[in-house]
Image (cartoon, helix red, strand yellow):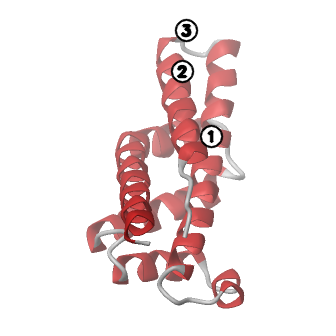
Amino acid sequence: MNLNTDHLQRCIQTLQSSVTLYGQAEAGSVEQEVFRNAIVKGYELVQETSFKLIRKALRDFGHGARQLDATTVKELLRLAAVHGLLSLDAVERWFEYRDNRNNTAHDYGEGFAKETLLLLPAFIADVGILEETLAKHFRRGDQDA
């Protein structure tokens, strides 16, 4: 199976840049608010792109597309751990990221800054590991074919 992670890589880079620019902007400025909004959208996009790739990857392990489409995100994460795409510790962190994402969908203000910004360094590291794992697994799989 071919699994291209280039879009996820680009989303991660964009999120990281938004975080950096947010930190450089003057506190309380419009620019900082623009970067905060970019972070929220980037955070959502990185998660949704990751879940889409996990669904596609799990098909390589014999899970049907219809079954996966009906599977909750948390169950997808558990299945990813079963197949070695995520560690159990990472799955627990991803649960926290998902719960936080659901909260940030309604809160672009101070609550976001307090919770999400604290999670972002670990999230960016974890999504980077996921991207590398997926890319490595499917590169190896292509070479075996």
Residue type for callout 3: Glu
Task: Identify the residue shown where x is 42% and y is 76%.
Answer: 80
Residue contact between numbered discs 3 and 1, judged by CB atoms under 8 Å: no
Residue, x 46% and y 74% (percent of image)? 77
Q: Nearer the viewer, residue 71 or 28?
A: 71
Identify the residue position indicated by label 1 in the image.
42
Residue that label 2 marks: 22
Left of 18 or right of it: where is 84? left
Residue hosting label 3: 26
State the image coordinates of residue 1 (x, y, percent, origin top left).
54, 70
Tell me which amino acid carries mark 1. Answer: Gly
Q: Nearer the viewer, mark 3 or mark 1?
A: 1
Instruction: List x then y, in percent, for residue 37.
Output: 68, 32
In the image, residue 89 sits, relative to residue 63, either above or below, namely: above
Marks 3 and 1 sit apart, C-alpha to C-alpha, by 21 Å
Residue 47 drawn at (x, y percent): 57, 55
Cα distance between the residues tagged 2 and 3: 8 Å
SS at badge 3: loop
Viewport quadrant of the C terminus: bottom left
Disc 2 and disc 3 in contact, CB within 8 angstroms: no
Q: Nearer the viewer, mark 2 or mark 3?
A: 2
In front: 47, or 109? 47
Q: Quadrant of residue 144?
A: bottom left
Q: Residue furthest top?
A: 26
Q: Measured from the top left, where is residue 94 in percent x and y?
A: 43, 63
Mark 3 is surrounded, within 10 Å at the Cα level, by few (under 14), some (14 to 19) or many (20 or more) other residues, namely: few
Mark 1 is surrounded, within 10 Å at the Cα level, by few (under 14), some (14 to 19) or many (20 or more) other residues, namely many
